[in-house]
Image: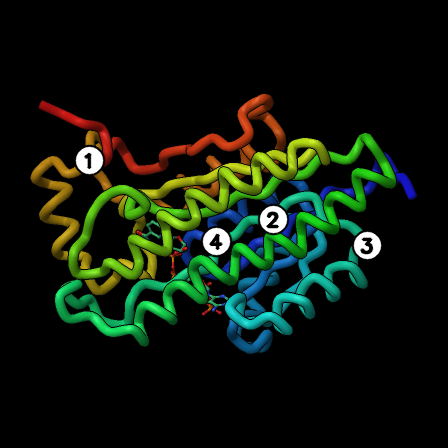
């Protein structure tokens, strides 16, 4: 069935209620997307956050699920199907840092398994569910367009020997982006990677002094922390379909951290 021309586009943002994910949710709500936001917390804990998003005049569905859990991912997609009947944009944002940074000479398998499950396996198989649904939507209506946007990290290429598990999970997401871009083009779906640098969120709260110092010493070309709004703005451009003929691209949101300099 072809979608009504007036139906709002629907975006799912994993980990969409705080940090970078909330920056993305706010941008897409302001852009007029109906939202499905995912997280692990009870809905009652984030009621005010959801209200802030609804204040943009869009519908907001909260999907509580652990992205590392297969039944949880299936339930999330089923809830969106029931609520909206369509999905145009998937933003794989949810992610975790290692509970403790540990030298790769010593770090254990439990941390590796946790990071790969949440940061790589979860988004990979959530993409598979969303991609199949998007392909079905395209087959029903050749005017359908979709986007899948993976939030990776400069750690996809920049080495941190005290969190190898995190780096490997993000390098995996970079390849997943390329795989899904190649697979989904025939269904009108573009797939992108957004690669943030050092962004001020709960994830980096424990290393504030370290990055304050490194930024003051010239870590980034743009001499400041990145913000969730910076990442939200980049995702907005991609979700609105303004970067055409560019599937598979990597968008750097790192203030020039990875610019080689002499
Ligand atoms: P954050 O402030 O710690 O927020 C993490 C978000 O992910 C929360 O919304 C959390 O949900 C959700 N989440 C975590 N594990 C989950 C799971 N298993 N299932 C579902 N949701 C889960 O982190 P952030 O800094 O915004 O990071 C967001 C993404 O950007 C991550 O993929 C991270 O690797 C990446 N990134 C961050 C930085 C940085 O400097 N901050 C730099 C580069 C890349 P709850 O609120 O319900 O717990």
Tag 1 secondary structure? loop
Question: Which quadrant of the figure contains the N terminus?
Answer: top right
Q: Is 118 displayed left or right of 125 in the figure?
A: left
Categorize mark 4 by other alpha carbons within 10 Å: few (<14), some (14-19), many (20+).
many
Q: CA distance from mark 2 to mark 4?
A: 9 Å
Between the C-alphas of marks 3 and 1, the distance is 43 Å
Q: Pointers 3 and 1 in contact (CB under 8 A)?
A: no
Residue topped by disc 2 = 90
* Dot 2 and dot 3 residues touching (CB under 8 Å): no
User: Where residue 24 appears, x then y in whole percent?
Assistant: 51, 47
Q: Mark 4 vs mark 3: which is more N-terminal? A: 3
Pointer 3: what residue? 85
Mark 1 C-beta closer than 8 Å to ligand 1: no
Marks 4 and 1: CB-CB under 8 Å?
A: no
Label 4 C-beta lies within 8 Å of the nearest ligand 1 atom: yes
The numbered disc on residue 93 is 4
The residues tagged by marks 1 and 2 sit, at their Cα atoms, a distance apart of 29 Å
Cα separation between marks 4 and 1: 23 Å
Q: Earlier in the sequence, mark 3 or mark 1?
A: 3
Which residue is identified by label 1? Answer: 220
């Amino acid at each position: 069935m072809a979608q009504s021309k007036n139906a709002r586009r629907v975006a799912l943002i994993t980990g969409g209620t705080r940090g970078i994910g909330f920056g993305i949710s706010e941008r897409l709500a302001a852009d007029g997307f109906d939202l499905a936001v995912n997280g692990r917390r009870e809905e009652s804990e984030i009621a005010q956050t959801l209200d802030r998003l609804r204040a943009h005049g869009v519908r907001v569905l909260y999907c509580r699920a652990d992205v590392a859990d297969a039944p949880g991912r299936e339930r999330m997609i089923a809830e969106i199907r029931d609520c909206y009947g369509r999905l145009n944009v998937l933003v794989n944002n949810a992610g975790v840092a290692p509970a403790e940074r540990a030298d790769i000479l010593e770090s254990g398998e439990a941390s590796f398994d946790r990071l790969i499950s949440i940061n790589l396996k979860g988004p990979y198989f959530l993409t598979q569910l969303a991609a199949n649904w998007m392909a079905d939507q395209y087959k029903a209506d050749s005017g359908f367009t979709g986007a899948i946007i993976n939030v990776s990290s400069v750690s996809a290429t920049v080495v941190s020997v005290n969190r190898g598990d995190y780096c490997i999970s993000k390098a995996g997401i970079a390849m997943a982006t390329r795989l899904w871009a190649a697979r989904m083009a025939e269904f009108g779906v573009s797939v992108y990677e957004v690669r943030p640098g050092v962004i001020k969120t709960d994830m980096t709260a424990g290393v504030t002094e370290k990055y304050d110092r490194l930024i003051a010493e010239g870590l980034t070309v743009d001499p400041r922390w990145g913000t969730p709004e910076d990442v939200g703005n980049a995702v907005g451009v991609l979700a609105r379909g303004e970067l055409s003929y560019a599937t598979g691209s990597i968008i750097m949101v790192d203030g020039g951290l990875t610019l080689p300099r002499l």
